[in-house]
Every structure is written in structure tokens, then in C-alpha cells.
Amino acid sequence: MNIAPPAAPAERITLYHRRHARQQVGKSFGHFGPAVVLLFGIAPVLSGEESFTALRALEVLIGAAYLALMVREWVHLRHHPHHREPVAWLELAAAAILALESYHIWHRHHEAALAGHPHKTPILPLLYAGTAVMFAVMAFRMKEMDGRRFLHLHGRGFALRTNRLGRKHELRWAEVAAVEPDGPADVLVRCTNGRARRISFAHLHEGAAHRDRLLAHAAAQLDAAPAAD
């Protein structure tokens, strides 16, 4: 009588592209955009063209927090480029800056219209507002987006997705005849129906280590099944 191999502890590992750290550093320079928006936003206050209101004070406070978060982000990327917090606070601060500046520009257009100036459709506030929404979504979804690349090892088989927009592969041990190394960071999965699937970890950070982790897990589970006959 065949008995299922002993269950292995479930392990879900987030996979990162091998250029992930460099990509995150490049993305961090994009945060200069909201910083420039902030600078132009408070320039009328510094020049005396606009009064320093409570809303402007809030914008300055958020701006100061934003600059501090930028420095914190660079330090974090230097030491822990593959760790993501549940909430990306820098993106959230960028969203707040852009939302406030969108309101200020819209308010100027509104006051100008009330003063009798020709009506104009303000495009910039809509652009800032849309970008603010994008940053807000990113703040709460970046960790989830990272998690789309994963390797899930469990007692019944394994599942993985090696490309963020790619297809999820899920196999159970009953479908697998063998899992073999194929090149420096790839595996060849031979199925019981005669088909073979090649899975590459070469484009991933520590791809060879993840490949070896899958091989070890498969060897332990597949070898245990005949021994239990």
C-alpha cells in the first residue's frame, strides 16, 4: 500500500529580480519629483505672494517628513534592499504632497474665476491628483506586488511564479516523476504523463540558491514516497 510522504514544513519565499536593488535605487530618484513640486508650492509663501495658512503649515510639515523619509529610504536600500515594509511611507508622503498642491492650484484657478478672469480648465491639478492616487496605491500594494514572485514549498508539492506578470506554476508530487538540475540555475521537472517543464531561476536574486532549495525539497519528498511502500 502506498503511503503519502511525510509532510514538510510549508515555506513561502518571495523572489526578487537579480537587479532588484539597483531598480529600487533608480526608483528612489523619482522621489525628487514630489520634492520639486513641494519647493514650487511653498515658493509663493517664501516670496510673500501668498499668506502662510494652516494648510501651508501642514504642507511644510509633510514636506519635512518627506525629506526625512527619503534619507531613511536610501539608508534602508543600502543595508536591506530586499526587505519591504507593509506600508511604503515615502510613497504615502509623496501622495499627500501632490494632493495638497493639486488643491492649491485648483484653488488659485477658482479664485481667479471668481475675480472675473477668463475661465481655464486646470490640467495640472488633475495630473497631480492622478499621480497622488498612483503613489497612494503603491504605498499599500508594493509589498503585495513583490510577493507575486514566489516559491512555495509544501508537503503536497510546490508552487512558484518567477515573473511578476507570468503564469503561476503549481505541481503536486502525484504529478511529478523527477526534479533535476538543468544548468547553473534551472530545473527540469519531469511529469508522470511524460511531459517536462523547465523552470529558470537565472534572472532572480540568489537564483541558484532557490533552485537548490527546490531540488532539496523535491528530493526529500519524492525519495520518501517509495520508502513508505
Image (tube, rainbow, N blue to C red):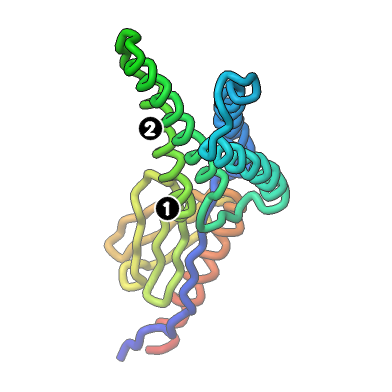
User: What count of labels does the image hold?
Assistant: 2
- Decide which of 144, 65 is in the foreground and name it: 65
Q: Residue furthest left?
A: 193
Q: Quadrant of residue 5?
A: bottom left
Q: Is residue 179 above or below residue 131?
A: below
Is residue 202 among the parts visible in the rendering? no
Secondary structure found at label 1? loop
Query: What percent of the width, then of the height, locates residue 159?
Result: 39, 62
| Tag of residue 130 | 2
Q: Residues within 10 Å of mark 2 (few under 14, many from 20)?
A: some
Is residue 110 among the parts visible in the rendering? yes
Horizontal placement of 81 versus 115: left or right? right
Q: Residue furthest top?
A: 118
Residue under numbered circle 1:
148
Residue at x 38%, y 32% (from the top left corner): 130
Q: Is residue 165 above or below residue 161?
A: above
Q: Is residue 5 above or below residue 82?
A: below
Three-letter code for the amino acid on which mark 2 is drawn: Gly
Three-letter code for the amino acid on which mark 1 is drawn: Arg
Query: What percent of the width, then of the height, locates residue 144?
Result: 44, 54
| Tag of residue 7 | none
* Label 1 or label 2, whichever comes before in sequence order: 2
Residue at x 61%, y 37% (from the top left corner): 60
